[in-house]
Amino acid sequence: MKKQIKTVLPVTIFILLLAALWELATTVFEVPHFILPRLSDVFISLWENRTLLGRHFVLTLGEALLGLALSVAVGVSVAIWMERFSLAKRTLYPLIMASQTIPIIALSPIMVMWFGYGIWSKISVVILFTFFPDCCEYIGRVPYGRPGDRRTYENDGSEQTGLVPEMEASVRTARLFHRAQAGSDNKCRRGSARRMAWR
């Protein structure tokens, strides 16, 4: 318990100091609210618009989950296809890597022009954000959980029984969903901000 308090207390104090500094600075220097609103005004606005924000949160969450599900399905399918067929990997992998040189933010307006302001333009943006990590995480540069796992299983004769490929697939899948879990909150935040901006 004391260890947890020692871990949480410094962070809590730092956040409270930042909040107090924010409120004090915007009040003393009379910073325009459109540049940096007071923290108290932010909380007031959140409370007054709680119904609207809650409704948009549910819609954005649904869009993010649907986009993430489609991205995982397509990304894993393409990754498996490239793993199974070397020609597909030699053909598609360079194109997938080259696509990452294009800023996603530059493609977002194009998605809006193609699909309009409906749900599919937002889902397409989620897929653009998540397809590359989903696909590459499943392919993976490190197919085993730890550096010694491959050697251990090979010495046990497991490679002949097919245990190593099963372990490889399970580790890649676990890494994939770990990445999806870690990135889901960012997708929701981007979607919420984008939805409010389009209204």
Image: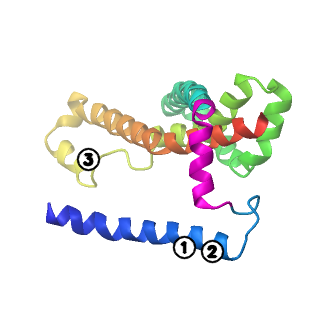
Whether residue 90 appears in this view of the structure is: no
Q: Residues within 10 Å of mark 1 (few under 14, many from 20)?
A: few
Q: Residue 4, relative to residue 130: is it above or below?
A: below
Q: Indicate the amino acid at tag 2.
A: Ala
- What SS does tag 3 mark? helix
| Labelled pair 1, 2 in contact (Cβ < 8 Å) | yes
Give the residue displayed 41% in from the left and 36% down from the top: 177
Which callout, 3 or 2, points to the residue nearer the camera? 2
Q: Is residue 73 above or below residue 184?
A: above
Question: How busy is the neighbourhood of tag 2: few (under 14 within 10 Å), some, or many (20 plus)?
Answer: some
Q: Nearer the viewer, residue 176 or 86?
A: 176
Q: Can residue 80 be spotted in the picture?
A: yes
The amino acid pointed to by label 1 is: Leu
Query: Position of 161 compared to 72: left or right?
Result: left
Q: Which quadrant, please, contains the C terminus?
A: top right
- Seen at 25% across and 29% down, the residue is 162
**Which residue position is annotated with label 2?**
25
What residue did someone put label 3 on?
Answer: 150
- The residue carrying mark 1 is 21
Identify the magenta region: 37-53
User: Above or below — where is 89 with respect to 45?
Assistant: above
Q: Residue 68, position in %: x, y?
A: 54, 30
Quarter assignment of residue 179: top left
Q: Position of residue 30 (x, y in %)?
A: 73, 71
Identify the amino acid type marked 3: Arg
The answer to whether residue 36 is left or right of residue 51 is right
Q: Which of the two residues, 83 or 26, is positioned nearer the viewer here?
A: 26
Splitting the image into 4 quarters, where does residue 25 fall?
bottom right
